[in-house]
Amino acid sequence: MKKTILIADDSESVREVVSFTLENAGYNVLSSVDGEDAMKHLNGSDIHLVVTDLHMPKMDGISLIREIRANELYKGVPILFLTTESQNSKKEEAKVAGATGWIVKPFMADKLLSAVQKVIR
């Protein structure tokens, strides 16, 4: 069975590159434009990993992580932060909220896949 990965990023080009990379590696990909849009996918569907941006309209990545961790069905799902932010304070905030890992944009496809393979169940 293919693993399903939910992506939340307000940049269409980033969503396309991440989706393309993950789909070519054999994953199912659900794509959303921000945290609020991503919440629509947390409806009982099998989701094995979430990849989220930090800065997004409506609901940012930290808020999305908190919502996921508060949801009994998804609280154990690994979450990778994919963002341009590299400040330690933001990394710590994401970690406290429940992020599993951090990938800084721009990223290489092999680094993304390596991070995904390390955390996906």
Image (cartoon, grey):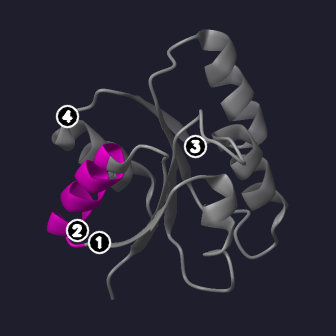
- The image quarter containing residue 14 is top left
Residue 47 vs residue 118, the one in the foreground: 47
Distance from the alpha carbon under mark 1 to that under mark 2: 5 Å
- To which residue does mark 3 refer? 100
Q: Which circle marks residue 27 in the picture? A: 1
Q: Are marks 1 and 3 in contact (CB under 8 Å)?
A: no
Determine the residue positioned at 81% across, 72% down. Answer: 72
Residue tagged 4: 108
Q: Are marks 4 and 1 in contact (CB under 8 Å)?
A: no
Q: Is residue 116 highlighted in magenta?
A: no
Residue 46 image point, x, y percent: 55, 82
Which of the 4 image quarters holds residue 82? top left
Residue 19 in magenta stretch: yes
Tell me: 38 left or right of 3.
right
Q: Which mark is residue 92?
A: none
- Secondary structure beneath disc 2? helix
Mark 2: amino acid: Glu
Q: Which residues are the magenta region? A: 13-26
Regarding mark 3 in the picture, which secondary structure is present there? loop
Q: Answer few, some or many: residues within 10 Å of disc 3's Cα (few below 14, many 20 plus, some between 14 and 19).
A: some
Please name the residue shown 69% across and 13% down the image: 89
In the rendered image, the vertical position of residue 112 relative to residue 89, given as above or below: below
Residue type at tag 1: Tyr
Image location of residue 7, percent across then percent down: 46, 58
